[in-house]
Amino acid sequence: MALATTTTSTSTSTSRVRAEHEQSTFSIRTKFRGAQSSDGMAQPVLLYLYQNGGTGFIARDAVPRNVDWVDQWKVFLSRTASEHGGQTDKSGTKRVFSRILIGGPGTARTETYLVVGR
């Protein structure tokens, strides 16, 4: 992936461009909730999102971007560790990411998660 760099009057904004790219992998906003069931969907996609339960469904033709990624294996990471980030747990391990998920074929994610491999 080539990373574009934009120059503003105050600074170079490489991290902003990178963040915009990562957020727009599927262009599904964090506040999107998806359907609770795939009933009635011709080609349902399991959607990893930030909500109680953590998943929902979206019709394949409703995925705005990179639909071809839906059928590939993917690795999703949460953006940051929100609970006890950087603190050592009982086993002596420091948590960096709250969640690491393997998304099989037929999955997508909201911008809550980063796609770090496919």
Image (spheres, grey):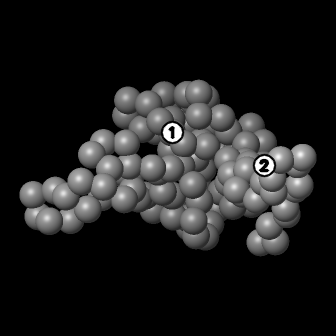
Residue farthest toward the front in the current orientation of the protein: 10
Please give left or right for residue 101 compared with residue 88 in the image.
Answer: right
Q: Which mark is residue 49?
A: 1
Seen at 81% across and 57% down, the residue is 12
Tell me if mark 1 has few (under 14), some (14-19) or many (20+) residues whose alpha carbon lies within 10 angstroms of its own.
many
Type of amino acid at the residue the image marks with label 2: Arg
| Residue located 36% across and 59% down the image | 96
Res 27 quadrant in image: top right
Q: Along the line of sight, which residue is nearer the eye, 53 or 27?
A: 27
* Residue 78, percent from left and from top: 47, 51
SS at mark 2 in the image: loop
Residue 16 lies, in percent from the top left, at 73, 50
Q: Is residue 106 visible in the rendered structure shown here?
A: yes
At mark 1, the secondary structure is loop
Left or right: 100, with 59 as reference point:
left
Cα separation, mark 1 vs mark 2, equals 16 Å
Q: Residues within 10 Å of mark 2 (few under 14, many from 20)?
A: some
On screen, 50 above or below 106?
above
Image location (x, y in percent) of residue 44: 61, 42
Label 2, on which residue?
A: 65
